[in-house]
Amino acid sequence: MFLGEGDGVVFRGANGPWQTDEHEYHLDAGAAKELLRTVIEEYERIHGRAPRELFIHGQASFKDEEWAAFCEAAPPGTNVVGIRIRTTNGDTKLFRMGDYPVIRGTALLIDERNAFLWSSGYVPQLDTYIGPETPNPLSVTILRSKYTRPSMKTVLTDILGLTKINYNSCNFNDGLPVTIRFARMVGDILVMGSVRSDAPQPFKFYI
C-alpha cells in the first residue's frame, strides 16, 4: 500500500501459486477479500477513516469473483479502481524532432480506458535523457471501478509520480511505478524467506 505522502506499508497475501492457463495470477474470492480488508484496516489505523479511493495496480486482468470480493471488502464510501500496467517491447514508438527522444510524461490517450505513457524519456529539467535507446511506453488500462471511473489523466499522473519514489534506487525515476517494481521485489523476498508474522510492515523495512 503506497500512500499519497510517499510512505508505504507491505502486506503478505495468501500463498500461491495463482498461475492460470492464461499465465496470469489471480486470487480466489476469500484471499482477495482478506487482502483488501487488511489494507483498509491499516489505512484506517493510520488516518482514522477509510480511504475515499483505492487503486489496485496489477499486470493482469481481474476475474469476476476476484473483483466482486475486492468491492465487497471495501466500505460503502470507498471507490475501488482496478488498473492494469504492462510494459511494451518496442511495439509502439513515438519520435520527436531534435537530438533527444520523447519527453518523459508524454501520454497517448487511445480512449477513456486505454493509454500509453512514456514514463522515461527526455527530462527538460536535467536537459538530458537517461537511457540507452528510444524509450518504450507503458500500456495503461482502467479495467474496472466500483463506482465512478476516474479520468485517465488522474490515473497517468499517479503512475508517473509513483516512478519516482523507489527509495532503493538513486535513479531519477524507474520505468515502472513502485507499485509494480518494488512489489515484485518484495514478493521475491517473502517467498524465499520464512515469515514469522503476517502483520503489515513499514515500507522502510525493505530498503
Image (cartoon, rainbow, N blue to C red):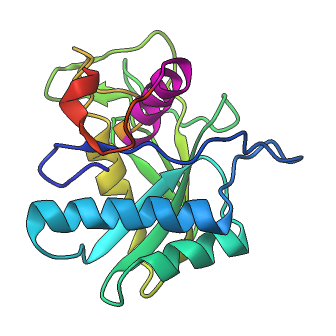
Q: Is residue 107 shown above or below 129?
A: below
Quadrant in the rendering for residue 11: top left
Q: Is residue 136 shown above or below 138?
A: above
Q: Is residue 72 shown above or below 151?
A: below
Task: State left or right for residue 197 relative to residue 67.
Answer: left
In the rendered image, residue 150, in percent from the top left (x then y), is placed at 39, 76
Magenta stretch contains residue 190: yes
Q: Nearer the viewer, residue 193 or 50?
A: 193
In the rendered image, residue 82, in percent from the top left (x then y), is placed at 51, 65
Task: State left or right for residue 90 relative to residue 47.
Answer: right
In the rendered image, residue 102, in percent from the top left (x then y), is placed at 41, 33
Q: Nearer the viewer, residue 29 or 3?
A: 29
Tell me, yes or no, if residue 76 can be seen here. yes
- Magenta extent: 179-194
Q: Nearer the viewer, residue 197 or 164?
A: 197
Quadrant in the rendering for residue 169: top left
Name the residue at 70% across, 47% down: 25
Name the residue at 51% across, 33% down: 95
Magenta stretch contains residue 107: no
Tell me, yes or no, if residue 153 can be seen here. no
Name the residue at 32% across, 36% down: 163
Task: State left or right for residue 66 relative to residue 39.
Answer: right
In the rendered image, residue 88, in percent from the top left (x then y), is placed at 63, 35
Q: Nearer the viewer, residue 80 or 171?
A: 80
